[in-house]
Image: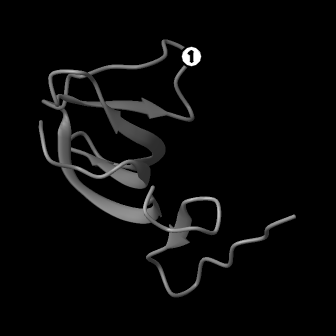
């Protein structure tokens, strides 16, 4: 998988259900994901994913700590 933005996603599994996951990319541009309910850590295996939805984008061009919500119901709390 390539092309996803850094951020927090809801990942939908082909086997059913979903997980929240941090998503980023490596030096070669391959997207990795780290579902918060996994203990095995990071993976680049997207074969079991049926869909995904970006909830919070880590946009490095935004001056407010680089984080912006892309979901209308997600409220950001900053210090």
* Residue at x 47% of width, y 34% of height: 35
Quadrant the C terminus occupies: bottom right
Looking at this view, is 45 or 79 the one in front? 79
Looking at the picture, the colour scheme in use is one colour
**Farthest residue in the top direction?**
40
| Residue 45 image position (x, y, % from top left) | 20, 22
Q: How many marks?
A: 1
Quadrant of the image occupied by residue 77 = bottom right
* Residue at x 22% of width, y 50% of height: 4
Quadrant of the image occupied by residue 43 = top left
Quadrant the N terminus occupies: top left
Image height of 8 relative to 45, above or below: below
Image height of 68 relative to 44, above or below: below
Which residue is tagged 1?
A: 39
For residue 2, side relative to residue 22 (left or right): left
**Farthest residue in the bottom direction?**
72
Image height of 20 relative to 64, above or below: above
For residue 40, side relative to residue 45 (left or right): right
| Residue 54 image position (x, y, % from top left) | 36, 63
Looking at this view, is 68 or 65 the one in front? 65
* Residue at x 40% of width, y 55% of height: 10
For residue 59, side relative to residue 48 (left or right): right
Instruction: Answer few, some or many: residues within 10 Å of disc 1's Cα (few below 14, many 20 plus, some between 14 and 19).
Output: few
Q: Secondary structure at mark 1?
A: loop
Looking at this view, is 1 or 10 the one in front? 1
* Residue at x 18% of width, y 31% of height: 46
| Residue 55 image position (x, y, % from top left) | 45, 66
């Amino acid at each position: 998988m390539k092309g996803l933005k850094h951020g927090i996603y809801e990942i939908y599994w082909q086997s059913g259900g979903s997980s929240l996951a941090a998503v980023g990319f490596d030096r070669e541009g391959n997207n990795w994901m780290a579902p918060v309910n996994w203990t095995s850590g990071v993976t680049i295996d997207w074969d079991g994913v049926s869909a995904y939805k970006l909830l919070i984008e880590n946009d490095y061009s935004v001056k407010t700590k680089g984080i912006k919500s892309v979901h209308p119901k997600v409220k950001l709390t900053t210090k």
